[in-house]
Image (cartoon, grey):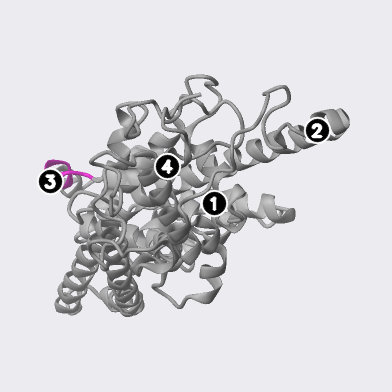
Amino acid sequence: NYEEIPAEELRDAILEANTDTGPFAFEPDPSAVGVQEQTAAEEAEKQRRVSLANQILEIMPQAEDREKLAAWEGDDADLSHADRYMRMLAAIPRLEQRMKCLMFKLRFDDDYSVCVEDLRHLREATDAACGSQHLHALLQAILEVGNELNAGTMKGDAAGFRLSSLVRFVELKSTKDPKVTLLHYVVETLLDNGADALLDVRAHLPHVEEAAKVSLTELQSRYREWVESLDRVDREIVTAEQSRAEIPDEARYTESLTFFYNQASEMQEEFKTSLEQVEGQAARLLQLFGEESGDTEPHSILATLTMFLKRLEKAADEVRRRQEAARANARRSGPAGAGTGSSGPAGAGPSRATATLPNTRRVNTLANAINAQAAGGLQNGGALGRPPSSPSSPLRGGQLGSNAAGGPSRSAGGADTLASLGSAKRPLPSQQSDSRTE
């Protein structure tokens, strides 16, 4: 509470913009023991300093009050404690400007550290997402599966799909087993084709989940606030320099503010350089996934990726456990069970043919392609056949998501392609019988 601080001590700290000693100094509780207690003590001390500055800004005497306090000719001892404080504050020149500069000085280091860390997460995540061959190969494989599911329709030869379509993969379910989704089908197809490595994409994108919480727009806004606040500090330094002849304390005040201004300006310039780099990387990320830069923030793409990859991991775990249970059941059944599939659920009956893509575009070449191709491989044609319509925007243009949104896509024969997903191994539409149903 400001009233607990001697008025003269508080006045001197404000006049000198002093945050090294006095009431605005950073002095955590020395009795705190252990990392958690020390961290909590430091946070409490930071909040105390900012809270004190806020209190002074809130109670600042207005023009009418300053006139009344200045007109007082009696003994200050006859004034109440609160009025003595007000009289002291009213005597400080440009109090509001001083306190705003002091507040900025108190908060800048912590705000800067948080924003730099957020910017680092965003930079590393956009770099990883743009350059991950595992991610590009996975999305290419999903596109191939989608095109095979939609074979014979107008949407069966898509060059790409919007990333938001990935949300639909858990919504499109089998009519025979609601627990089986299109995502399970994709997982089984990848496993059956030896592309297990593509199911571990999340491990190659460690910063994406954290960066999904970071708004580039907010970082840009914070940078603009720093520019405005530093301009305010600069103007206050100029004003104080002009007043040094009348106000002796202005010398220490301008020295303190000038030191802070130079240091903060250098940090701001470093942040600006990093921010511009991340803005370029974010534009590349949006272009890669076919999104308009004015409509989409990079963190929304990263959030969609995080959600999908978590669900992919869960689906992969479920499929693997189901396949292992089926193999264990087959072993217990002995020779009598030799004719049953090893990857379908226990008791599911005969399995279908192993799910594969056409020979010219098989998914099992993806794992080798990841290690064999240089950067930019799969998105520019890669192991999966024809290149997309736009090399600079490899995942753009398809409508796979609209099929998922409207229900199961249909094969040329008209049957629901997910109607027969009751067991683990299923043929794609191009390998089913003419009837396309069971």
Q: Can residue 64 be found in the magenta stretch?
A: yes
Q: Which mark is residue 43?
A: 1
- Taking the image as shown, residue 119 lies to the left or right of residue 272, namely right
- The amino acid beneath tag 1 is Glu
Q: Looking at the picture, which amino acid does disc 2 mark?
A: Ala
Q: Which residues are magenta?
A: 61-66
Q: Amino acid at mark 3?
A: Ala
Q: Which is more toward the observer, 30 or 412?
A: 412
Q: Secondary structure at mark 2?
A: helix
Q: Nearer the viewer, mark 4 or mark 1?
A: 4
What whole-number distance in Å separates the C-alpha atoms at marks 1 and 3?
A: 35 Å
357 magenta-colored: no
Q: Position of residue 5 (x, y in %)?
A: 46, 50
**Circle 2 is placed at which residue position?**
330
State left or right for residue 365 relative to residue 232: right
The circle on residue 63 is 3
Q: Quick check: can you spot residue 394?
A: yes
Residue drawn at x 32%, y 68% is: 281
- The spot of residue 319 in percent (x, y) is 64, 37
Three-letter amino acid code at the position of disc 4 = Ser
> Mark 2 touching mark 1, by CB under 8 A?
no
The Cα atoms of the two marked residues, 3 and 2, are separated by: 89 Å
Q: Which residue is mark 4?
A: 430
- Looking at marks 2 and 4 on the same chain, the residue that comes earlier in the sequence is marked by 2
The reply to whether the C-beta atoms of the residues labelled 3 and 4 are less than 8 Å apart is: no
Q: Between disc 3 and disc 4, whose residue precedes? A: 3
Between residues 380 and 52, which one lies in front from this camera angle?
A: 380
Measured as percent of width and height from the top left, residue 259 is found at 35, 79
State the CA–CA distance, disc 2 to disc 4.
Answer: 29 Å
- Which badge, 2 or 1, comes first in the chain's sequence? 1
CA separation in Å, label 4 and label 1: 62 Å
